[in-house]
Image (tube, rainbow, N blue to C red):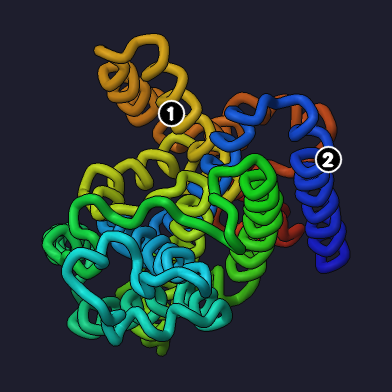
Amino acid sequence: MKNTQKKARLKEAAIVGAIALTFILLVPGIVPDARLNQLGRFLALAIAALGIDLIWGYTGLLSLGHGVFFALGGYAFAMHLKLQIPPNSSIKVPEFMSGFRVELPWFWQPFHSFPFSVFAVVAIPAILGAVLGYLVFRNRIRGVYFSILTQAATIVFFNFFNSQQLINGTNGLTQLTLFGASVNSRDTEYIFYLLTVLFLAATYALCRWLTCGRFGRLLVAIRDDEVRLRFSGYNPTGYKVLVFAISAGLAGVSGALYTVQTGIISPTAMNIAFSIEMVIWVAVGGRATLSGAILGAFLVNFAKTLLSEKFPEVWLFFQGALFLIVVTVLPDGIVGWLQNKDFEHIRRLFKKPKYASTYPSLEQDPEVQREKEELEH
């Protein structure tokens, strides 16, 4: 059994590596520059979708506030880029501050450092997620009440950032530069596209590593029967806090990569609608599949872009209809449907074992199969 699992993991790693190399070596030569930038943004959003899949698909925690962590990661890196001021410039603060301040605020000062900014992209959302998660989970708040609390947090942060002129309020941070060049230049966009592909592959590997072992089984146990897990001697609070912090950190990385490829970050990333969109990506692709989260983020955002270009007045109706169809017809998402329904007869042709989403090792155990056959006869 261990050898079989090892071979499956190696096969999966080879497939992920081949896909990553395809996106790095072949796609840039085929896709136009404008579409390549869009593709880079979609891949950045897929990192946030993987974080949502960790807490919702595997742990059963529906967060409607991940836009906050996404925006915090974007702001952390954008603040560093705004401080890329030429040494010979007479203005030592970002341009939107020049009319009312002559000194840089204290909380901007650390973002002069590139290493600190990169650390902050992950640490600030992760720490906030850990603190919020601890306050919520230690009181055993879950289900719809957890979702409402995360949504309320989104409203609080949106209103706070929207009113703060020291981070340019409603307008957000724009006109970002890196090493004297605009982040919207062709060469810079290509570099960040490559980084996004690499980060997405690394994030997928991290999530797969977290979910394929004992930690992943505990997350599934929390999702399926948390009360029974407590009676088994485990305290789910620490595991939920940890996975929520990891998910928040991944959203921060996603926000930073998305920001440098769009050239702007504003409080609109913290609004409720965007956080709900993240959940839709995972629902469309398939919960607890990881690959489904990536596929859902790509398909939904590609459809959103295409429909808004072709049907600018009614494209929202198409997006809503897509979500309703998936929820009613494909409740397990696209990847879940393929795994459980459509390809089952193909799997049997190749003598593959029946797919089990929760406990595959138990379903494939020869003793368990023998007992099932005896009971059937």
SS for tag 1? loop
Question: Which residue is denoted by mark 1 in the rendering?
Answer: 330
* Image quadrant in which the C terminus is located: top right
Q: Is residue 200 visible?
A: yes
Q: Mark 1 against mark 2, which lies toward the viewer?
A: 2
Image: 312 above or below 43? above
Q: Is residue 292 visible?
A: no
Viewer-nearest residue: 8 or 249: 249
Q: x%, y% of residue 49?
A: 47, 50
Q: Which disc, if any, is residue 25?
A: 2
Badge 1 crowding class, 10 Å Cα cut-off, few under 14, some 14 to 19, many 20 or more, is: some
Q: x%, y% of residue 368?
A: 67, 58
Question: Which residue is painted at 44% across and 25% down in the image?
Answer: 305
User: How many numbered circles are shown?
Assistant: 2
Badge 2 crowding class, 10 Å Cα cut-off, few under 14, some 14 to 19, many 20 or more, is: few
* Image quadrant in which the N terminus is located: bottom right
Viewer-nearest residue: 336 or 153: 153
Image: 290 above or below 141? above
Image: 79 above or below 274? below
Question: Which residue is painted at 63% across and 33% down in the image?
Answer: 36
Residue furthest to the top: 310
Q: Is residue 108 left or right of residue 187?
A: left
Quadrant hosting residue 252: bottom left
Q: Amino acid at mark 1?
A: Leu
Q: Amino acid at mark 2?
A: Leu
SS for tag 2? helix
Q: Is residue 198 left or right of residue 70?
A: right
The CA span between labels 1 and 2 is: 34 Å
Quadrant hosting residue 97: bottom left
Question: Which residue is painted at 52% across and 82% down in the image?
Answer: 113
Q: Is residue 259 left or right of residue 350?
A: left
